[in-house]
């Protein structure tokens, strides 16, 4: 089921979906690395707290951009991966990464 987001401009839809402290980073890391566990995401995003990462993952899952798979083990194991919808974000994430690299290198 697709959620209806009320916006004044279509760009707002994208911003509402990936706007957040580390949502673009989470999506980009999952796109590059594939399925990861929570601890692996924490290790890749060193500037985020556990609480913030948990909240951002929940929002991305609720919006259908990532999949969460919990295993009935002790200790619990949870893995995250891009959903099919999340995969459609790749061109946007790649463009953001390229722009950041070019800006950092002074080529723009």
Image (cartoon, helix red, strand yellow):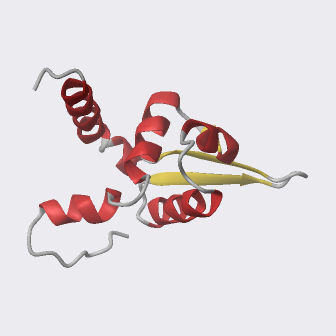
Taking the image as shown, residue 25 lies to the left or right of residue 74, namely left
Q: Nearer the viewer, residue 101 or 73?
A: 101
Q: Nearer the viewer, residue 48 or 71?
A: 48
Question: What's the residue at 41%, 38% (across, down)?
Answer: 28
- Quadrant in which the N terminus is drawn: bottom left
Q: For residue 105, what is the image quadrant? A: top left
Q: For residue 89, what is the image quadrant? A: top left
Taking the image as shown, residue 20 lies to the left or right of residue 104, namely right
- In the image, residue 27 lies at what x, y percent? 42, 44
Does 24 appear above or below 40?
Answer: below
Does 64 appear above or below 40?
Answer: below
Q: For residue 13, what is the image quadrant? A: bottom left
Instruction: Give the residue furthest to the bottom.
Output: 6
- In the image, residue 34 lies at what x, y percent? 53, 33
Taking the image as shown, residue 104 lies to the left or right of residue 72, namely left
Question: What's the residue at 53%, 47% (across, down)?
Answer: 47
Does 64 appear above or below 4?
Answer: above
- Quadrant in which the C terminus is drawn: top left
Q: Nearer the viewer, residue 102 or 54?
A: 102
- In the image, residue 84 lies at what x, y percent? 40, 46
Q: How many marks?
A: 0
Question: What's the residue at 65%, 52% (across, down)?
Answer: 69
Q: Nearer the viewer, residue 19 or 100?
A: 100
């Amino acid at each position: 089921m697709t959620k209806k987001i009320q916006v004044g401009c279509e760009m707002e839809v994208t911003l509402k979906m990936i706007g957040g402290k580390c949502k673009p980073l989470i999506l980009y890391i999952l796109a590059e690395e594939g399925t990861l566990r929570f601890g692996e995401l924490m290790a890749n995003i060193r500037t985020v707290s556990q609480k913030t990462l948990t909240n951002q993952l929940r929002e991305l899952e609720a919006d259908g951009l990532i999949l969460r798979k919990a295993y009935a083990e002790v200790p619990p194991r949870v893995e995250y991966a891009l959903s099919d919808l999340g995969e459609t974000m790749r061109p946007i994430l790649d463009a953001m990464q390229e722009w950041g690299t070019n800006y950092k290198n002074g080529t723009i």
